[in-house]
Image: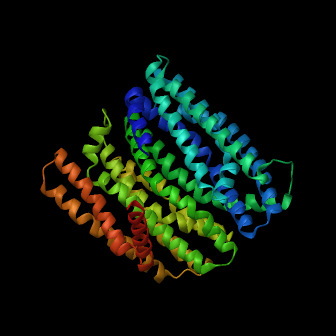
Amino acid sequence: MAVTLYTSRVVLNTLGIDDYGIFNVVGGIIAMFAFMNNAMASATQRYLTFELGRKDFGQLHKVFCTSIHIHALIAFIIFILAETIGLWFLNTQMTIPAERMEAALWVYQFAILSCIVMLMSVPYNATIIAHEKMSAFAYISILEVILKLLIVYVLILFEFDKLKLYAILMFGVQLLTRIVYGLYCSKNFPETKYQKIWDKGLFKEMTGFAGWSLFGNLAAVAFSQGLNILLNMFFNPAINAARGIAVQVQAAIQSFCGSFQTALNPQITKTYAARDLKQMHSLIFASSKYSFFLLLLISLPVLIETKPILAVWLKQVPEHTVSFIRLMICISMIDSIANPLIVSAQATGRIKVYQATIGSILLLIVPISYITLKLGGSPESVFLVHFLVVIIAQITRVWMLRPMISLSIIQYIKSVIGNIASVSALSLILPMFIYVTLPSSPGRFLLVCTLSVLSVGTAVYFIGLGDKERNLISNKLKAITHSNK
């Protein structure tokens, strides 16, 4: 997280606001085509984890090989779409200065290559998650951030066009990281040894699952890259740079709870496969509230003291960055409690109505935002639309999962919503009081950050945790204290 934030700062300063904005919006075009892969990645993850839960290793190998065939087909389709429709859109519809169009095309082509590499690595990454080998992700992630840190210094050292060089180097990091993931899987998981296995029934079943997942993934692309393109169409690359910074902050903060969710997701699917619904519900509640608490712990100081943090972090702060970051953090709060429900719906395999409904709701974000901007709305208005729609989508998720997994809405409200509302309200009191009453200064900044962390920690311990969880923490602390003595 620290390296991500640091490299974002240096890259922004090295590329400049406009080039940084161009990199984000051009890469977003490829991400729009990659929504097909996101749907298939969900299917691959679900089927691999489900077969592990059933301990059917022969079927597990079939699922892996079938997913390789499907991802190769998706890579070919995306390549054709990107080099035709995508290229036309870049050349005719995007607001890019004429003198930077050549560099934008370089970014575009290397984004396509990165996308293809990512596509073919999905089955390997999904296998690691299904086996819950989180240590592999930890070590490879450390390697990845070190390589990205090296990119920063290469950008400073060489006089080659910075935007072109950045695109090439980012592709290199993507390629090397994916090779490492592949080698790890080949060494540790026998089912990842590829064979030309063709199971027509399994192919049809997995693509059918992915087809209905397409709605949700299309919506995800629409409210991320779609909004990015809308902002470019109505404003300029500087606005995209502001959003790019906000996205970097959001990604860094979400990674803090994302690893926690990645560790729990396979367990949710496996307990459903074993028909242990009581344990499944317990995991959903735990994943939802602890993900929110982790996000609140790291984001509350950023949410309150956004301006001074940006002033220290960045030399150039694009206009609207402060409001963008605050709004995206609020959106991330809702997303953090949505993930366990999404995984639960996928675990059932019965996602036709679920995905059609949730996807349709989320797809409303872009047309409503477009109308808002047409009526003279500010850049911030699209984030407000996004925030309101994801709240509606979350309410709908809970209601739809009630019959799918026998989920008690009352228990969910009590265990998740009530907990996070109480913890959030109490956590805000002290840091907000200091923020409002004291003038801006380094002393206030440090005090607000310290009180934010202490307030969240205290509220979570006394309100967010149950008796069993508090006893577990107390026993761990006693054990650590005793060992130190």
> Residue visible at 46% across and 62% down?
336
For residue 201, which quarter of the picture? Answer: bottom right
Q: Position of residue 80 (x, y in %)?
A: 70, 37
> Residue visible at 66% across and 35% down?
84
- Asked if residue 88 can be seen in this view, the reply is no
For residue 419, which quarter of the picture? Answer: bottom left
Q: Position of residue 464 (x, y in %)?
A: 38, 73
> Residue visible at 39% across and 37% down?
6
Which quadrant is the C terminus positioned in? bottom left
Q: How many marks?
A: 0
Q: In the picture shown, does residue 180 fall above or below 250? A: above
Residue that sits furthest to the top in the current view: 159
Q: Nearer the viewer, residue 322 or 136?
A: 136
Q: Position of residue 115 (x, y in %)?
A: 63, 40
Side of 477 relative to 317 (left or right): right
Q: Nearer the viewer, residue 354 or 248?
A: 248
Q: Position of residue 339 (x, y in %)?
A: 53, 63
- Asked if residue 50 can be seen in this view, the reply is yes
Residue that sits furthest to the front in the current view: 485
Indicate how the structure is coloured in the image: rainbow
Side of 116 relative to 447 (left or right): right
